[in-house]
Image: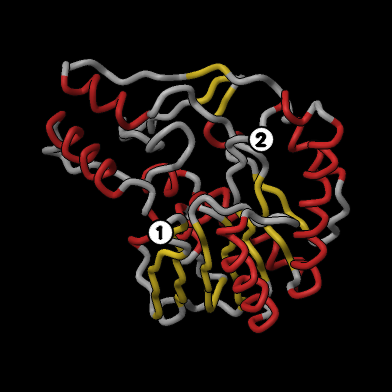
Amino acid sequence: MELPQQWTQQNDIEFSHYIKKSHVFVGNVTKCDIEKHYFVNAGNVYTHYCEVESSLTGNLTAMVIGNSYAHNVLPVISSNQLLKKVTSFTAFGCLYVKQPKRNCEGYQNAVNEAVKRIKPDIIYFIQGYVKITNSKLRQKAVSEIWAENFKFAFDFFQQHSSIIITNHQHFRFRIPINAEYLRLKYFGYEANMNARKAPGLTTLDKIQLNVSCSKCLWINYNDFFCRNDYCTPIDPFLRLPMFLDEDHVTIIGARRAQDLFENVTKKASEKII
């Protein structure tokens, strides 16, 4: 990606305003052949359904399942030329777990029916685990619940697909990145907001990896956005924000992570063939 030669700091500000306006609906830039947007349960849960087929040339089918974190990388996944059809079914604020929140039960049931009907080659199971902290997971009962959640999801998805591509828990910044970027740009400052990250896997990552899943391939955003225990929210080349808030990627962040998804999809295709 490159910026136009005449790009100025004012353009930085305008782009940041555009990101703010679009909020976490980054996936909505995807050109869907069939698309449905709707709110369920008195507006508490935004659900997005999308099918992409006409622009793809591959031979594999895929489903994208998860919350807003899955929705945000839909443009990247749906442009992969190894795929012939992508069906995305995401709900903001809903985690796919053994006992979902009451306002997420309908969404999860609909996902299960879609998975059984479509039987995709690949399931991209992408979730953000914002409130699942290391301190909570030190409680044995909590860690056991999450082990059961992952087993529940993996067992079901493995029955109806060939490969599951799923994510580890990625780094969460302490401030809303785009808002801080906009503030600094207004006052003429360069936006540098690198943040230190604890080395190694999180407790939740370790719980995930301890659950048997022979069809799972793992991705970790930290491999891309973090280097030497520091994570950067600003694109090093474009100098534009890669994160909207503390942990949702913008379209810039999604595009920068494209290699991550293309590489793991290529591995998945080799396992299927």
In this figure, which residue is indicated by the disc labeled 2? 132
Give x and y (percent) for residue 104: 58, 60
Give x and y (percent) for residue 98: 75, 57
In the rendered image, which quarter is residue 191 located in?
Answer: top left
Label tally: 2
Element type where label 2 sits in the image: loop
- Residue located at (57% from left, 66% from top): 107
Give x and y (percent) for residue 87: 53, 73
Left or right? Give the position of 24 relative to 226.
Answer: left
Element type where label 1 sits in the image: loop
Say above or below: 51 vs 68: below
Say above or below: 125 vs 254: below
Tags 1 and 2 touching, CB below 8 Å: no
Left or right? Give the position of 220 relative to 13.
Answer: right
Does residue 5 show up?
yes
- Residue located at (61% from left, 35% from top): 131
Q: Amino acid at mark 2?
A: Ile
Q: Amino acid at mark 1?
A: Gly
In this figure, which residue is indicated by the disc labeled 1? 43
In the rendered image, which quarter is residue 6 located in?
Answer: top left
Question: Which sits in the foreground, 266 or 19?
Answer: 19
Q: Quadrant of the C terminus?
A: bottom right
Disc 1 or disc 2, which is closer to the eye? Answer: 1
Dot 1: few (<14), some (14–19), or many (≥20) neighbours within 10 Å?
few
Question: Going from the N terminus, do you reach mark 1 or mark 2 first?
Answer: 1
Say above or below: 205 vs 158: above
The figure's colour scheme reads secondary structure
